[in-house]
């Protein structure tokens, strides 16, 4: 399935799984949104501040692996902002199609190893 740019759209089932994980995290109080930025930083959209990814508290990290498409390799992460203590989520791609920003942020978050669930999609 392609979008308007001709790029492959994510598998609809993968979107459902990501949405389900985000909803589960939201029910646990992770309602804020965050995004990877340059240099291994993450921006919290609650306080609008960027901080190094390894300064965020990782409460949960769930990896999703696409059956055959590297574009479906995602890490859905529940974090606590070091500045404002907002609880939010960030979805990061990993693998061969990951952006540099996502790869750097995920590497720093993985280095913490706290609160992560190593099972793909668990």
Image (spheres, rainbow, N blue to C red):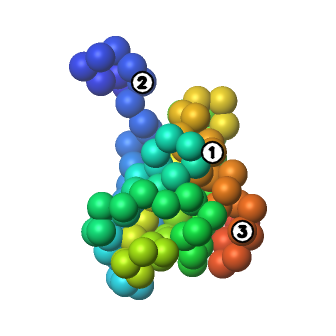
Name the spot of residue 97 as percent of width and height, x first: 58, 30
Disc 1 on helix, strand or loop? helix
User: Is residue 18 or residue 80 the one in the foreground?
Assistant: 80
Q: Are marks 3 and 2 in contact (CB under 8 Å)?
A: no
Answer left or right for 43 relative to 114.
left
User: Is residue 33 or residue 5 the one in the foreground?
Assistant: 33
Residue 65 — which label?
none
Q: Badge 1 is on which residue?
A: 104
Earlier sequence position, callout 3 versus callout 2: 2
Q: Badge 3 is on which residue?
A: 112
Disc 3 on helix, strand or loop? helix
The quadrant holding residue 56 is bottom right
Q: Badge 2 is on which residue?
A: 8
Earlier sequence position, callout 2 versus callout 1: 2
Disc 2 on helix, strand or loop? loop
Q: CA distance from mark 3 to mark 2?
A: 33 Å
At a point 56% along the width and 58% down the height, the residue shown is 52
User: Is residue 6 or residue 77 the one in the foreground?
Assistant: 77
Locate the C terminus by quadrant: bottom right
Q: Is residue 71 above or below residue 74?
A: above
Q: Are there few (<14), some (14-19), or many (20+) residues within 10 Å of tag 3?
A: some
Q: Are there few (<14), some (14-19), or many (20+) residues within 10 Å of tag 1?
A: many
């Amino acid at each position: 399935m392609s979008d308007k740019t001709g790029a492959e759209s994510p598998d609809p089932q993968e979107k459902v799984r990501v949405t389900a994980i985000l909803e589960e995290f939201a029910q646990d109080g992770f309602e804020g949104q965050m995004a990877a930025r340059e240099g291994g930083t993450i921006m919290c959209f609650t306080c609008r501040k960027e901080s190094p990814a390894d300064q965020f508290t990782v409460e949960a990290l769930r990896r999703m692996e696409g059956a055959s498409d590297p574009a479906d390799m995602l890490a859905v992460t529940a974090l606590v902002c070091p500045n404002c203590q907002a609880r939010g989520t960030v979805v990061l791609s990993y693998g061969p199609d990951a952006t540099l920003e996502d790869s750097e942020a995920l590497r720093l978050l993985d280095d913490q190893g706290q609160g992560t669930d190593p099972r793909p999609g668990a």
